[in-house]
Image (cartoon, rainbow, N blue to C red):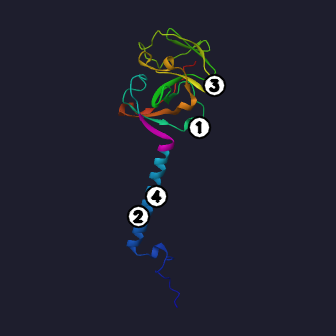
Amino acid sequence: MTDAPSTQGPLAPASLLPKRRRSLLLSLGWLRDLLIAIVLALAIIAFVYQPVKVEGTSMAPRLSDQERIVINKFIYKFGPIERGDIVVFRYPRDPGKSFIKRVVGLPGETVEIRRGVVTINGIPLREEYVPMGEQDAHSYPATRLPADHYFVLGDHRRSSNDSRVWGAVDRSYIYGKAVFAYWPPERFGVIESANGEE
């Protein structure tokens, strides 16, 4: 029997393992960490963020046709939907399709459009995000929004199919908020909300 440390068996210190074996264990450790990071990233993408492609010009100039953006699917689990948010939702007339619009009216508010001017509870909404020359002169009768319903409009009013046509969107249909644009490169950046209030 000897007091010398053994280099054999599973309890041997890492510093006494053969160099090749130490290198292999280190590589396996890095591979394990990489796989965990990938799984976590995929989980975050699957449950929190989702890349989507904008189709159409109803949100121009803020969002352009074929632009790639990221939506946050988790944000409304903890916070309210706010006026000015650009939201993605299932189209009420065909839930198999998704639309992207800006929230203008909130539950319990009275929305009216007078020759293109949106009013909330009788007060005109300041909408600097609507491009000059793309406003329209249509009107919409004063309508009180039910609980959990949101009035949504496209910024490009003359080419938008929105709540003026098919009414308010039920909260359960809204599943994400546009938060970031990443393609094309010149559009790269955070997508800001704009509530239109003074």
Magenta stretch, residue numbers: 45-52
Residue highlighted by disc 1: 77
Q: Nearer the viewer, mark 3 or mark 1?
A: 3
Q: Is residue 140 magenta?
A: no
Tag 4: amino acid: Asp
Residue highlighted by disc 3: 147
Tag 3: amino acid: Ala
Sequence-wise, which precedes: disc 3 or disc 1?
1
Q: Pointers 1 and 2 in contact (CB under 8 A)?
A: no
Question: Of 147 and 124, which appears nearest the observer?
Answer: 147
Tag 1: amino acid: Lys
Residue 33: numbered disc: 4
| Secondary structure state at the residue bearing disc 4 | helix
| Secondary structure state at the residue bearing disc 2 | helix
Residue highlighted by disc 2: 27
Sequence-wise, which precedes: disc 4 or disc 2?
2
If the image is split into quadrants, where does the C terminus sit? Answer: top right
Sequence-wise, which precedes: disc 3 or disc 4?
4
How many callouts does the rendering have? 4
